[in-house]
Image (cartoon, grey):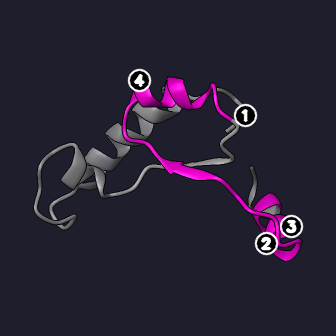
Amino acid sequence: MTINDFYARYHANQKISMVTCYDYTMATLINETPIDAVLVGDSAGMVMHGYDTTLPVTVDQMAWHTAAVAKGLSQQF
């Protein structure tokens, strides 16, 4: 989906399905679903690294998670 797709759906009162993903394996499973969008968020620090908050998450960590997810997703995203 593009920004314009989000905008059009919002103004047409159409729902958008989105999930959070942090790794390659889950991304490959998401390919088998009709999900519209995937979020790679800084909550990966808490979920995957055991931090108490998202504050210690670095840009390098986010880049690593984003690259892993992107590798597992098809071109539909």
Is 17 within the magenta? yes
At label 4, the amino acid type is Thr
Query: What residue is at 59 percent from the left and 52 percent from the top?
Result: 18
The answer to which image quadrant residue 24 occupies is top left
At label 1, the amino acid type is Gln
- Upstream in sequence: badge 1 or badge 2: 2
Q: Which residue is mark 2?
A: 10
> Where residue 38 appears, x then y in whole percent?
55, 47
- Upstream in sequence: badge 3 or badge 4: 3
Q: Which residue is mark 3?
A: 8
- Upstream in sequence: badge 4 or badge 2: 2
Query: Where does the magenta region start and end?
Result: 5-33
Estimate the spatial distance between the alpha carbons at disc 1 and disc 2, rounded to whole Å.
20 Å
Instruction: Tell me, for residue 25, which label it has, or none.
Output: 4
Tell me if 34 is positioned left or right of 68 in this view. Answer: right
Estimate the spatial distance between the alpha carbons at disc 1 and disc 4, rounded to whole Å.
17 Å
Estimate the spatial distance between the alpha carbons at disc 3 and disc 2, rounded to whole Å.
5 Å
Estimate the spatial distance between the alpha carbons at disc 3 and disc 4, rounded to whole Å.
31 Å
> Where residue 42 appears, x then y in whole percent?
32, 58
Say whether marks 1 and 4 touch (CB < 8 Å): no
Q: Give SS at disc 1.
A: loop
At label 2, the amino acid type is Tyr
Estimate the spatial distance between the alpha carbons at disc 4 and disc 2, rounded to whole Å.
30 Å
Say whether marks 1 and 3 touch (CB < 8 Å): no
Crowding near pointer 2: few (<14 within 10 Å), some, many (20+)? few
Query: What residue is at 70 percent from the left and 29 percent from the top?
Result: 75
Q: Which residue is mark 1?
A: 76
At label 3, the amino acid type is Ala
